[in-house]
Amino acid sequence: MKNYLLLSLALLGVIVMLYAGLNGIVKNYSYGFFFTFTGAITTVGLGLDVINHLKDRERRNSVRKLGRG
């Protein structure tokens, strides 16, 4: 449960960062591109973390079905 809360808070942070970056680009602020680029790279990393978490959870469930967990 704690992992899901942490992932959802990270997702919320990425959404806020992307919004601030896109808003900065539209209004021609100097930080717009920086926040957009950082948010995009963070989105990729967060996606990889979510996929890794789901694969690990599936592996643990498979081991439990075999009676070893």
Image (spheres, grey):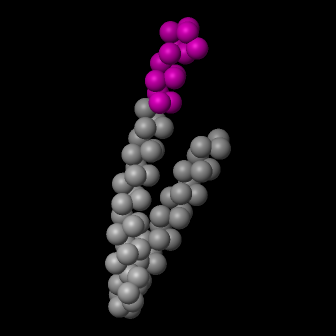
Looking at the image, which residue is at 38% across and 87% down?
Answer: 30
**Looking at the image, which residue sits at the far right?**
2
Q: Is residue 48 above or below residue 41?
A: above
Q: Is residue 63 magenta?
A: yes
Looking at the image, which residue is at 50% across and 9% down?
Answer: 66
Is residue 48 shown to the viewer in this render?
Answer: yes
Quarter the N terminus occupies = top right
Magenta-highlighted stretch: main secondary structure?
helix
Q: Quarter of the image holding residue 27?
A: bottom left
Does residue 28 appear to the left or right of 65 in the view shown? left
Image location (x, y in percent) of residue 21: 41, 77
Is residue 22 shown to the viewer in this render?
Answer: no
Q: Nearer the viewer, residue 61 or 14?
A: 14
Looking at the image, which residue is at 43% across and 38% down?
Answer: 52
Q: Which residues are magenta?
A: 56-69
Quarter the C terminus occupies = top right
Q: Quarter of the image holding residue 24?
A: bottom left
**Mark count:** 0
Image location (x, y in percent) of residue 29: 39, 89
Q: Is residue 57 above or below residue 12?
A: above
Q: Nearer the viewer, residue 14 or 33?
A: 33
Looking at the image, which residue is at 55% across and 15% down?
Answer: 64
**Looking at the image, which residue sits at the far top?**
67
Q: Is residue 27 magenta?
A: no
Image location (x, y in percent) of residue 26: 35, 87
Q: Is residue 15 above or below residue 20?
A: above
